Image (cartoon, rainbow, N blue to C red):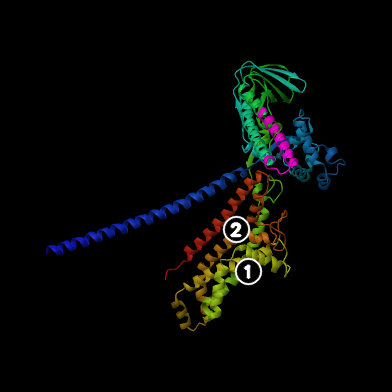
Amino acid sequence: MSEITSHHGSLLTGNDRRLKQRRRAETRLKTYGIAAIGAAGLALVALLSSVMVQASKAVTETYVTLPVTLDTVEIDPNGTGDPKTILRADFSGLTKATLRNQFPTIKGRSEKRALYDLVSSGAAFELAQKVSEDTSLVGQTIDYDFLASDVTDLYLKGVFGEVRQLTPHGTLQVEPDGKTVQLTSSGNDFSVALAQVKKQLLIKAKTTRAKAALQNNGVEEFRRRAEMAETEKDHQKNLKLAAARAKKRDTLLDQAADLERRATGNEGAEELDDDTVSFLVKVGNSWIKLTRVDTQRAEGIAIGPLSAGTFANWGLMVTDLPENARKVSDTQIVAIEQLRDAGAIKQVFNWRFFTSRDSREPELAGIWGAAVGSFWTMLVTFSLAFPIGVMAAIYLEEFAPKNKFTDFIEININNLAAVPSIVFGLLGLSVFLGVFGVPRSAPLAGGIVLALMTLPTIIIAARAAIKAVPPSIRDAALGVGASRLQTTFHHVLPLAMPGILTGTIIGMAQALGETAPLIMIGMVAFIVDIPGGITESASVLPVQVFRWSDFPERAFEAKTGAAICVLLAFLVIMNAIAIFLRRRFERRW
């Protein structure tokens, strides 16, 4: 009896142990699943966050409000009031003259060129369009909102750093000296600028020592070659090269030592160059760019009219980046800050991004042309892929005999669903464009290629939806005298249509985001005009994203992010429609 009880107890112990092991395995599986979902969620959040932060710079656009004198002699000399005559006037020169009048002290050629870059190159055309539409403006002086350039817009959004204001502790004595200005502070207000210069000197010294180390490597290498030389001529040649490298090394080491001495010493003023952050002094309405600093004294170049005197209220500003590390120059910064102080800068929601066509100028570029091109391309894709895919699914599922030929077709349909999309682009390039002469870069060509790529997805989804219809529906229809064709189209197809539409929308969403096949057929070309049909040249949203991401201008980074957000919004809407259709028309048998 005791042996039976012991055996029974051991069985219970073994069962409990196995039960605990199963529970631990189940817990581990749940943990792995939660961790996988969490990792995927974090990756998605990181992706969307980076895209949205990048796109946030394109939400608004900047305008510069300036008074413009629309002189009749320059715009409409004959007084005809003809819009075509007005459009031929030199509005570009008028825009530049307006900027010069606003900043009369900016005289140099490079400074004027920087000044003209404050507004977009398309601002003059928009002004011409406005005046041609309202000819009564000719002869008046109006306040016009000029579209700011991408440089101005990005500076105001902090892309090129900010101008930080330092608190001065003393009064400032200003002494103009020809083209330069001598500044003296009663406090050590310029010590911050001097410390920045000394920091840059240490960086230069480190770089110079690294260059000296490379020259020293050359010295050792040429000496090694001299020792291994087989002839006296080669021996002397390598010794000379080693001596030349040694001379360069010693020169660099002397330069590094001098830089370090200047950086750690307390004597003498130092120059501010393009490798150092810019320091700007504001005195009244005038600005001074510092070029040489000491702890209490500084020298600079005046930007604007300046008179001698002692000033208690003055400002010392410093940029976050050196001038050679940002696209906006110090002259442009001063002009922008003056405009901002005058209330001539305003930022509004960027409707232009959604309503304008593509442009080489980032502040003028929009997605409307690509959106219309995507519409025409998707229209061609749906018109071809949906009927062909549904008919093929109906035939294979309802009418085709089960033999080796149909098995071969089914295998190839499944294989086509896994073919890389660029292969379909090569097919379109060689067959549709090369053989049938379909217009290049047109939505017709893109739609045909994307239809071929989408067909397997639609066929597979449609077959699954048709197969899900219970056989009793078919039996009941046949039982009351309906033919197989009537049974399929009057009963089976309507019941399977929600599933078919769901698969079709998912396939269309996939086609909407494709880029590689469209690049192969030439839809990557720069297209300015809005396409009016399926045979006109056009671009599409994913190709627009690809093109903008390859442009060097910083402003196109924001445009790229915004276009990605628009594309993702379309994809989310299409998938939401698919989910709605599935839940709305889903039937439980």
Q: Which residues fall within the magenta stretch?
A: 226-254
Q: Where, by quadrant of the figure, is residue 333 drawn?
A: top right
Q: Is residue 137 left or right of residue 499?
A: right
Is residue 142 visible in the rendered image? The answer is: no
The amino acid on which the numbered mark 1 sits, given as a three-letter code, is Leu
The amino acid on which the numbered mark 2 sits, given as a three-letter code, is Gly
Is residue 500 visible in the rendered image? The answer is: yes
Residue name at image x 63 percent, y 15 percent: 186
Classify the position of the C terminus by image quarter. bottom left
Q: Is residue 356 highlighted in magenta?
A: no
Q: Where, by quadrant of the figure, is residue 489 drawn?
A: bottom right
Residue at label 1? 384
Residue at label 2? 513
Q: Return the x and y of residue 413 as percentages of the image width and height.
A: 56, 71
Q: Is residue 253 left or right of residue 409?
A: right
Query: Label 2 neighbourhood size at 10 Å, few (<14), some (14-19), many (20+)?
Result: some
> Of residues 346 and 248, which is closer to you in this image?
248
Mark 2 and mark 1 lie on one chain; the one further toward the N terminus is 1
Classify the position of the N terminus by image quarter. bottom left
Q: Is residue 522 left or right of residue 16?
A: right
> Of residues 270 and 182, which is closer to you in this image?
270
293 above or below 1?
A: above
